[in-house]
Image (cartoon, helix red, strand yellow):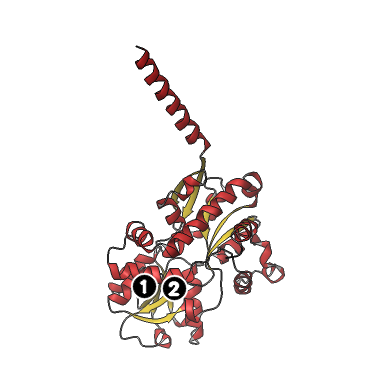
Amino acid sequence: MKVRIRQLAIASAWAFLLCNNAAAQSPVRINWTAVTGAQSGMFMAKQENLFKENGLDVELVHIPSSSRGIQSILAGEIAFSFMDGVNAAQANLKGANLALVAGATNRQVFSLMAKPEIKRIADLKGKKIGITRVGSSTHTSALFALNSAGLKPSDYQILPLMEVPNIFTALSAGQIDAGVMSPPTNSRAKKAGFVELMNIAKEGPEFVSVAIGTSRTYIKANEDIVRRVVRAYAEGVQMFKSNKAAALKMIANQLKVKEPEIQEDTWNQFREYLEYPPYVSRKGMEAVLAEISDPAAKSAKADDFIDMRFVAELDKKSGGK
């Protein structure tokens, strides 16, 4: 009888500890917007339990649009979302009061892929070009590439196709002549025989392409949660860059890439361009503001849109490495 009572007491103690541990985990909803390695830091943090290690109970949700992610933040439905610099800046200029708290890529990690018979960007005159959405990073990248060849908006047709994999599907089906794709989709297109007309990450400017944002209201009310999210994300990026096996596992499971050579190419591309420490580039934000036609953007400053104190704290603790 005494043994039975002792067993029950031990079981009760464990249950109490587990409940307390669960209660200590702060619930956070974070939106990922696209099937791309640009968001690998968040996927790695989830896969490797880095959020839990930082006292967070994170739910990753998928809303495939920066603008819709921003709307969900403002509605209080989610806490954080990946977003591109242009959408974040435009929303703030309209009074959204957002802040980018961590940077993913300060380069536009996209390729302009085209049918094999198209040899130059100038050959896209009169053609159809696929992007995800008007105003998205793929749209900005397409405009940069097309403008570099002297093409005007009246010279081609832009087709929004919602998701990057859809662009490859449409190109394969002959529904478009070219499209802007990120890894792993650009790797898949190369393997299928399509040509890369421009690697925009290498040939394009420094530009805030993908970052993590939230509202300044949320930051003020939940500063420690923001700190822990940024820390877990940064640890995820570091692990992606340094632990190839774990990174390839994530690419296979989250990005649904089964081909080893495409996994490897995706890892190599984003190992180079994922920011660590994950600062949002001020120069890249200035480039974003220069692209926005709203007159208010001309007097705005990069620091109006970013809050790098949490990344700076991590950088300082790591000795600036």
- Quadrant position of the N terminus in the picture: top left
Alpha carbons under labels 2 and 1: distance apart: 8 Å
> Whole-percent x and y of residue 263?
33, 67
Q: Is residue 214 left or right of residue 46?
A: right
Q: Is residue 141 above or below residue 39?
A: below
Report whether 60 appears left or right of 218.
left
- Callout 2: SS: loop
Residue 20 x/y as whole percent? 50, 32
Q: Residue furthest front?
A: 3
Q: Are marks 2 and 1 in contact (CB under 8 Å)?
A: yes
| Place of residue 123 in the rendered image (x, y in percent of width and height, measured from the top left) | 39, 87
Q: Residue at x 48, y 76 (%)?
A: 201
Q: Residue furthest right?
A: 299
| Residue that numbered label 1 is attached to | 186
Q: In the rendered image, which residue does mark 2 sit on?
A: 110
Q: Residue at x 54, y 51 (%)?
A: 229
At label 2, the amino acid type is Phe
Of mark 2 and mark 1, the one earlier in the sequence is: 2
**Callout 1 amino acid:** Asn
Looking at this view, is 299 or 309 the one in front?
A: 309
Residue 36 - label: none
How many marks can you see? 2
Going 65% across and 69% down the picture, which residue do you hit? Answer: 294
Q: Residues within 10 Å of mark 1 (few under 14, many from 20)?
A: many
Q: Quadrant of residue 296?
A: bottom right
Within 10 Å of disc 2 (Cα), the crowding (few <14, some 14-19, many 20+) is many
Q: Return the x and y of residue 284 as percentages of the image width and height.
A: 59, 71
Q: Nearer the viewer, residue 58 or 62?
A: 58
Q: Tell me the quarter of the picture where residue 113 sits.
A: bottom left
